[in-house]
């Protein structure tokens, strides 16, 4: 009876162990790369959904059925409204969507936006929604229900196309 391993048996077991470690390391590296890719895609989807949610809530919670749409050119509209949706914890803020240098901005203020370009003494909070190729808002012709079609085409290839009906009080 033997009480110890031979040198050949030890070499074979070390070789098998090292082969297993190489495969485990490769699978671990593959898992890390797929996790990185999925995390990046998840952040992109979260960003898109957040933009859609903000635009949807602004238009669906618009107050006084007073949404002012100013057409700047064939690809850009400027929108002024009052909404009960606030990102900066303001009570019934006035909201504006403005495209400046191909970037879509959401402005939120306690003072009403009356004209574009804005006054220099205006005070508001700014949120950038990203670079856009076009931002258009169309109002429904139906007088019974106030609805809007919002189309924003971003440079990264994403697109927002929403039909939003203003909620009744």
Image: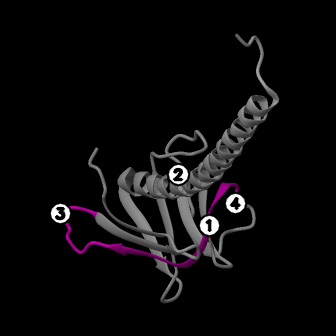
Q: Mark 3 points at which residue?
A: 144
Disc marking residue 46: 2
Q: In which quarter of the image is the C terminus?
A: top left
Residue 107 belongs to the span the image colors magenta: no
Ranked by sequence position, the earlier of labels 4 and 3 is 4
Q: Which of 61 and 32 is in front in this view?
A: 32
How packed is label 4: few (under 14 Cα within 10 Å), some, or many (20 or more)?
A: few
Q: Answer with left or right where residue 107 lies relative to residue 83.
A: right
How far apart marks 2 and 4 lie (CA) works out to 31 Å
Q: Which of marks 4 and 1 is in front?
A: 1
Q: Are marks 1 and 2 in contact (CB under 8 Å)?
A: no
Which residue is farthest bottom?
Answer: 74
Residue span colored magenta:
122-146
Q: Give percent across and percent down for residue 87.
A: 57, 45
Visible residue check, residue 110? no
Q: Give percent across and percent down for residue 76.
A: 52, 81
Ranked by sequence position, the earlier of labels 1 and 3 is 1
Q: Are marks 4 and 1 in contact (CB under 8 Å)?
A: no
Q: Give percent across and percent down for residue 62.
A: 39, 54
How far apart marks 4 and 3 lie (CA) works out to 34 Å
Q: Answer with left or right where residue 101 lies relative to residue 65.
A: right
Q: Name the residue under label 4.
A: 122
Q: Which of marks 2 and 4 is in front?
A: 2
Which residue is farthest front?
Answer: 1
Disc marking residue 152: none
Instruction: Give the residue displayed 38% in from the left and 50% down from the top.
Output: 61
How packed is label 3: few (under 14 Cα within 10 Å), some, or many (20 or more)?
A: few
Ranked by sequence position, the earlier of labels 1 and 2 is 2
């Amino acid at each position: 009876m033997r009480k110890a391993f031979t040198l050949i048996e030890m070499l074979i077991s070390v070789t098998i162990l090292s082969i297993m470690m190489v495969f485990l390391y490769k699978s671990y590296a593959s898992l890390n790369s797929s996790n990185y890719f999925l995390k990046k895609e998840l952040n992109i989807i979260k960003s898109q959904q957040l933009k859609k949610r903000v635009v949807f809530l602004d238009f669906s919670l618009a107050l006084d059925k007073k949404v002012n749409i100013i057409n700047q050119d064939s690809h850009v509209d400027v929108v002024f409204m009052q909404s009960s949706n606030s990102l900066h914890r303001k009570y019934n803020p006035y909201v504006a969507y403005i495209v400046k240098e191909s970037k879509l901005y959401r402005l939120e203020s306690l003072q009403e936006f009356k004209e574009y370009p804005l006054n220099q003494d205006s005070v508001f909070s700014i949120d950038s929604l990203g670079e856009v190729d076009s931002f258009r808002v169309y109002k429904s012709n139906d007088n019974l229900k106030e609805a809007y079609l919002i189309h924003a085409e971003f440079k990264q290839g994403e697109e927002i196309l929403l039909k939003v009906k203003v909620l009744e009080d």
